[in-house]
Amino acid sequence: MNETVSVRNRIEHIPHPKYRPDIDGLRAVAILSVIGYHGFPFWIRGGFIGVDIFFVISGYLISTILYESLRLDAFSFVEFYIRRIKRIFPALLFVLTSCIIFGWFALLADEYKQLAKHITGGVGFVSNYMFWKESSYFDNAADTKPLLHLWSLGIEEQFYILWPLILWSAWKQKFNILTIILSLTIFSFILNIKSVSTDAVAAFYSPQTRFWELLAGALLAYFTIFKQNILSGLKIKINSWLKIISHQNQKDKKIDLVSNIQSALGSLLIVIGLIRISKEFHYPGLFALLPTLGAILIISAGSHSWINRKILANRVFVWFGLISYPLYLWHWPLLSFARIFGNETPSRSVRISAILISVFLAWLTYRLIENPLRFGKYSSKKAVILTVLMLLLGLGAFDSFKNNRVSGGAAKVESLSRQIGWTIPVSSMEQIENCHTMFPERTQLSPKERDDNFCIIAKNKTPNVVFVGDSLNLSIFPGISKDDKMNALVLSASAAAPFYNIRTTEFNDSIRMFNYRLTNQALDYAIENADIKIVVLSFLNGTDLTDAKNAFKITNIENLNEKNPKHILTAALASTLKKLISKKKKVIYILPNPMLNYDIKNCLASYRPFKPVGNSKKDCSESYLEYMNQGGREYREWIYSVLNDFPQVKVIDLAKVLCEKDICWGMKDGKVLYRDRGHLSDDGSELVAPFIIEQIHQELDAVR
């Protein structure tokens, strides 16, 4: 019994790092940088590096606690995670609960389902994996995800789970801790460098490519605790040399030139990062060294260096540092909700208001929720209650997501709001799976090389019509799949031109690097299968891809020397048509529907319980002339210039179906025709389907 009490006493008196107000000040720099970037990205281009600073601080403080506990033989997994629960759960639970309650009254069906999904990920601390998986062509804008910022909390919590286990095991086995830290840090950093050039999204969200920043803090903590004499001796020698060089009085012990230089250099690195780094960079990569090394230099400089003592330890900075965690949790949901309700980027005054409100809520959370639950009596009971409440919230959110619970705000407009967004599948999974069995070679591709919606078949029998193209195929499928006289096989590759050997990738990323392989497979299947009578080509993104200044890079993998996108696409289209026609295939080319200049949710703005902060689109229409002037005319002129040599190719122009005279509709007769700015909804698909089906039947009758 006495032995048990002794152990408990040791655990309850686990040494914590001596409080340093300058580290709270550094937290303030981190959170204010992040908020500045989120609120005013054109002013503070590199503000997102504040997250990297947080990673270093977390790695340093947590590792300091772990090292001291292990050294004193006072470490307890239970006590460690109780402390983590009391530190992380109170504010997080309050913010997540507030978001789901607010979302119930204010969001549309697709928005509420997405929020419920993200709350589930936030509760499970796997948000980084969730957003990594979601990052795709069909993903909605980042600023319409109120909990997107939880990706960084996910990485920290994953580190908190793994790092104590690794350290404890290594300590018990008497392994060299320094070797382990260095090895893991170097491995993670190298993985980060390699991944950022091949898969920037994975490098950003993956814990493997981010842990090196937390481990950098752990490395600093190791030297601070176990090698303090070496560091102090080295600093004394360098100080002496510097004082000789600068003619300082050797007896003046108060002047620590090394620490001042460290702090100044660290601050300079962070400032350079804030100014020079931007979202266009492949990040993290090498650029993440700026905030990481900057934070390490500032922390290692100690609390007595001038910048740390006079600036970072200033009361204002310390105050922001103390509320930095709840402020991080609050600021992004408020900015995101403002974006959702305004259907556009909020005005400067709205953004400033959202930030000020988040500061006030963070202070209240810190004073009334975080501190009372984090400190005081009944430590274990608090942790158990917080854990149960978090699990209940997660289960409730998961149930809402899984069972498509309709929010209160969406009740009046459920059928319309469910048309919006790609959360609603365009086909049953059975249809997709049955279709993929027709392409066994697809399994030879890596997950990165294949599209899960590449193949959809309307009926489980031999197809006679094949649609080859980009995501326009997916958006028109619901309507064409209902025709009884044809069996449509839809083969799509995200953003891909439906021509042989054309690679389309975004300039700032490597996604869709292998989409041409899927397109080539689709065209080969159409040519080689005698049952296929008609091949329908669709190309929604052609309006952008024919513009040399667009966001996509167009490459002919068999002719890398050609750089002009229009020349590349012209040759590829002509070559593809020649191959199809030579095999006696009837070809139909679908010209895309107009791209909307407004968010389709503007059309439903009047149904929200909160009136839009920005402009709504009550009539849900736009000028046909404006659409044509923004690329529609150029695209059509290009297509017809190629098709002049192929008079047998039939053309269907969806703009003629969706536009009347000079007006193009996004919502008509009480039906939402689009699911986003470019893709048709199920209702939109059913509107244009008869025109497509009629043309296909005419061609089928001609070959019978």
Image: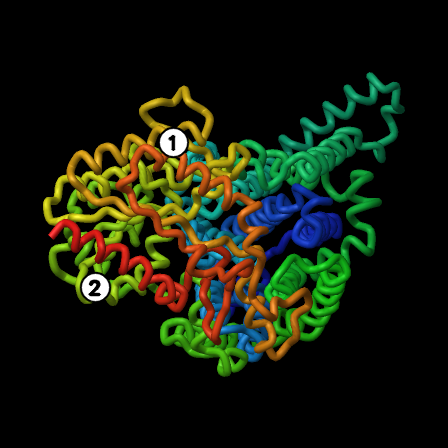
Q: Position of residue 685 (x, y in %)?
A: 37, 63
Along the viewing direction, whichever of 74 and 627 lies nearer the viewer: 627
Q: Nearer the viewer, residue 110 or 473?
A: 473
Q: Does any portion of residue 9 appear in the rendered image?
A: no
Q: Kindly identify the amino acid type of the residue bearing the numbered disc 2.
A: Glu
Q: Position of residue 599 (x, y in %)?
A: 56, 61
Residue furthest top as drawn: 245
Q: Residues within 10 Å of mark 2 (few under 14, many from 20)?
A: few
Identified at 42% across, 22% down, the residue is 562
Residue 65, placed above or below residue 417: above
Q: Which mark is residue 570?
A: 1
Q: Quadrant of the N terminus?
A: bottom left
Mark closest to the chain's N terminus, 1 or 2: 2
What residue sits 56% from the left and 63% below the top? 621
Side of 194 relative to 83 (left or right) = left
Say which element carries label 2: helix
- Front residue of 106/650: it is 650
Indicate how the structure is coloured in the image.
rainbow
Residue under numbered circle 2? 430
Give x and y (percent) for residue 300. Answer: 67, 38
- Residue 184 in the image: above or below residue 251: below
Q: CA distance from mark 1 to mark 2?
A: 37 Å
**Where is 56 relative to 475, above or below?**
above
Say which of 414 and 282 sits in front: 414
Q: Would residue 588 appear left or right of 642 to someone viewing this image?
A: left
Residue type marked 1 = Thr
Determine whether, in the image, residue 95 is placed left or right of residue 486: right
Check disc 1: other Cα within 10 Å, few if <14, some if 14-19, many if 20+.
some
